Image (spheres, rainbow, N blue to C red):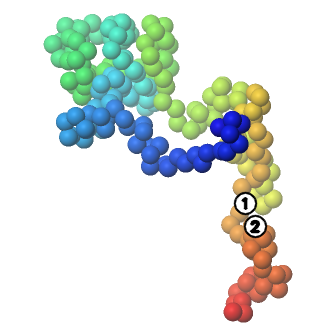
Amino acid sequence: EREKSGHGHLVEVPMLDAVISFATNSIAQFFRNGQTPSPYQRPAASQCFVLPCADGKLIAVHLSTPPKFWEALLEVIERPELAADARFASAGQRIKNYDALSEELGRSFSKKPQAEWTAALECLDVPFAPVNDFAAVVEDPQVKHLGTIIEMDHPRMGRVKGINSAVHYDRQREANRMAPPVLGEHNDDVLREAGFSGGDIKRLREGGALDP
């Protein structure tokens, strides 16, 4: 618009509007029946499960609605009898009995460590992802490849780690290697920008008061 007419537009994105826009499906259901959906309705409808493994780690499985994912999962966990269970005989029944199915899957996944389930699920093309703790995140090969974690020298705290900028320009990540300040480190700079004199800053630092 600026190029066409010489006048730009003011663009505003209130955070509340942005958050609500992520819940359009649930709010549409509310407008239809007047009921606020359960916080588990969305995971149930999309057949998402987070399951504990034998080593205490978690794995997320997303079956969606295609039968092939459900059938492949049963093969992975070696539980073909669940296909004949009336509670899980169709996608609709699996959604309706989400809690019961989650319990059944939990019993199976608790028998092997995460790494074994990862290999088996990947082999049969079941949508999944390991649930990482921060220790696993920082050691993730893709995180290392991207250079997400950076190290920098702090004037008082020595060598510290931080998170790099997530924005890439022309395939390059913007460098963000300024060490985090300690409490009050930039007080004098802020006060000078606000118009305080050197004498004023000295009196404030010593606990004195400024003249009215």
Q: Tell me: residue 170, above or below residue 14.
A: above
Give percent across and percent down for residue 79. Answer: 29, 10
| Residues marked 2 and 1 touching at CB (< 8 Å) | yes
Give percent across and percent down for residue 32. Answer: 22, 34
In the rendered image, is residue 78 in sight? no
Furthest residue to the bottom?
211
Q: Tell me: residue 102, above or below residue 72.
A: below
Find disc 2 in the rendering and name its residue: 186
Furthest residue to the left?
86
Find disc 1 in the rendering and name its residue: 181
Left or right position of 203 against 5: right
Q: Amino acid at mark 2?
A: His
Quarter the N terminus occupies? top right
Q: Quadrant of residue 53?
A: top left
Instruction: State the residue in front, 9 or 62.
Output: 9
Instruction: State the residue in front, 52 or 66.
Output: 66
| Mark 1 surroundings: few (<14), some (14-19) or many (≥20) residues within 10 A | few
Give percent across and percent down for residue 169. Answer: 75, 33
Left or right position of 180 against 73: right
Left or right position of 50 against 33: right
Earlier sequence position, callout 2 versus callout 1:
1
Q: CA distance from mark 2 to mark 1?
A: 8 Å
Identified at 22% across, 12% down, the residue is: 90
Identified at 72% across, 33% down, the residue is: 168
